[in-house]
């Protein structure tokens, strides 16, 4: 009975580690993609003091992907060696080695957890630096209501967003000829 409970909890732990490594890889890839897409945007200009922070965040996210990949590989080697050990216990004449590249299953288990925690640290640092550099860069940007009417006075970023949202709301009701009548107005709708 105790072996059944242990096996069930062990299977749950293996499944959760899989999900966690997948989440870390996905989050790192999303942050890396967001940063690279912003670099391609000609309107996104990083201040000189934040270029190093932004670059470091992208490097940390790349390292997160690499370390997560290493965690997956060491985990698979751990599973392979564990299966070999079970076969050797069941069949004493089993001849395959219980080491791969000079490491046994316990070494690969420790390496998997080490890579997992290292990827967590890299992800947290990379995303924190990415968010800080984006907030510092985009927090100073001006949002113009239109190209003909740029906002020239200094106001908080939230006010810019509110003005832009109001402008978008007002534009939704206009017809193709530019009149201020709501769409469908005067037609008895």
Image: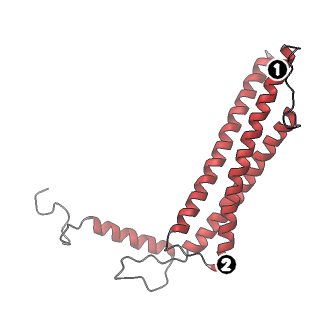
Q: Quadrant of the C terminus?
A: bottom left
Does residue 82 sit above or below 113 in this rendering? above
Q: In the visual, does 158 lie left or right of 50?
A: left
Task: Name the disc covering residue 49, or none.
Answer: 2
Q: Residue at x 65, y 62 (%)?
A: 58
Q: In the visual, does 153 lie left or right of 45?
A: left
- Observer-nearest residue: 121 or 89? 89
Q: On the image, which quarter does residue 17 sit in?
A: top right
Q: Position of residue 51 (x, y in %)?
A: 65, 73
Q: Position of residue 73 (x, y in %)?
A: 74, 40
Disc 1 crowd, CA 10 A, few/some/many (<14, 14-19, 20+): few
Q: Which mark is in front, 1 or 2?
A: 1
Q: Residue at x 84, y 14 (%)?
A: 90
- Observer-nearest residue: 10 or 118? 118
SS state under label 1: helix
Q: Residue at x 74, y 34 (%)?
A: 76
The residue that label 1 is drawn on is 86
SS state under label 2: helix
Q: Residue furthest bottom?
A: 152
Q: On the image, which quarter does residue 106 sit in?
A: top right
Q: Residue at x 39, y 68 (%)?
A: 165
Q: Quadrant of the N terminus?
A: top right
Does residue 169 sit above or below 30 in this rendering? below
Q: Position of residue 57 (x, y in %)?
A: 67, 63
Q: Residue furthest left?
A: 187
Disc 2 crowd, CA 10 A, few/some/many (<14, 14-19, 20+): few
In the rendered view, how is the structure colored?
secondary structure
Q: On the image, which quarter does residue 4 sit in?
A: top right
Task: Name the disc covering residue 136, or none.
Answer: none
């Amino acid at each position: 009975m105790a072996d059944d409970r242990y096996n069930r909890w062990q299977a749950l732990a293996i499944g959760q580690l899989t999900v966690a490594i997948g989440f870390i890889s996905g989050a790192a890839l999303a942050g890396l993609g967001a940063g690279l897409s912003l670099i391609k945007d000609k309107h996104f200009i990083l201040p000189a003091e934040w270029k190093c922070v932004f670059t470091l965040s992208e490097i940390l996210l790349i390292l997160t992907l690499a370390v997560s990949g290493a965690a997956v590989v060491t985990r698979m080697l751990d599973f392979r060696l564990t299966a070999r050990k079970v076969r050797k216990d069941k069949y004493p004449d089993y001849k395959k080695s219980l080491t791969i590249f000079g490491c046994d299953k316990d070494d690969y288990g420790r390496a998997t957890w080490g890579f997992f925690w290292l990827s967590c640290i890299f992800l947290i640092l990379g995303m924190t630096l990415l968010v800080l550099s984006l907030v510092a860069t985009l927090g100073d940007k001006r949002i113009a209501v239109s190209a003909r009417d740029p906002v020239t006075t200094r106001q908080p970023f939230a006010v810019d967003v509110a003005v832009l949202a109001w402008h978008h709301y007002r534009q939704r009701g206009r017809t193709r000829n530019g009149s201020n009548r709501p769409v469908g107005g005067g037609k008895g709708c």
